[in-house]
Image (cartoon, rainbow, N blue to C red):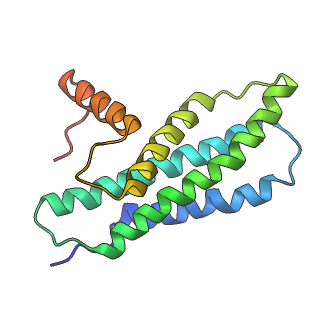
Amino acid sequence: MAVQMPLAVRFAERSVGAFRDESGEARNLPGDAFDCEAFLQMGIQSFEWLVRGDQVYRAAIYKGEKHNSDIEKAIEDLFRKWLDRGKFANEWVATLLKRGDSVDNLAEFRQCEEEAAAIVAFLDSNQNDAELPEAMRALRDKAISEHRNGETAEFF
């Protein structure tokens, strides 16, 4: 039986969509740091849902469910859409930082952005069996290290 669209992926679709839609609304906002932080938090949370959806999908495949190319394509498209919204977020942040404001959750957002960029770069390489890009190798090595040190939760 083929994997059905996991709830986490459906929620990620709505969450990334809201993140995308808010970027249009945010363009009309004054440069308020609290609004920017809320926008970045929306991005962080939508990224977390997207990663969770990808994990749930891959866990189902690992457990023997049949591959579903529609789900895989939806997840890939969501990573691209999420990363595209990051461009607007960075413009907003740059404006605030230039003014001397601080953005409390910027480091966490940038971590999400780095991971999304590495995922999209890997997808764009279209060589799943080839050498991993440097950014993906760094993320892989970090994940392996965290797992060995007991810093991750068991997933399966």
- Residue in the image at 34% along x and 56% along y: 54
Residue ranking furthest to the bottom: 1
Q: Position of residue 137 (x, y in %)?
A: 32, 35
Image quarter where the N terminus lies is bottom left
Kindly tell me whether residue 34 is visible in this rendering: yes
Q: Tell whether 122 sits left or right of 65.
A: right
- Residue in the image at 87% along x and 26% along y: 99
- Residue in the image at 21% along x and 20% along y: 149
Q: Position of residue 69 (x, y in %)?
A: 30, 74
155 or 74, which lies in front? 74
Residue 50 sits in quarter: bottom left
Rendered position, 16 above or below 1 = above
83 or 152, which lies in front? 83
Q: Tell whether 40 sits left or right of 8.
A: right
- Residue in the image at 77% along x and 41% along y: 92
Residue 8 sits in quarter: bottom left
Kindly tell me whether residue 105 is visible in this rendering: no
Q: Position of residue 97 (x, y in %)?
A: 79, 27
Rendered position, 78 above or below 4 = above
Q: Tell whether 70 sits left or right of 17.
A: left
Residue ranking furthest to the left: 64
Q: Position of residue 155 (x, y in %)?
A: 21, 44
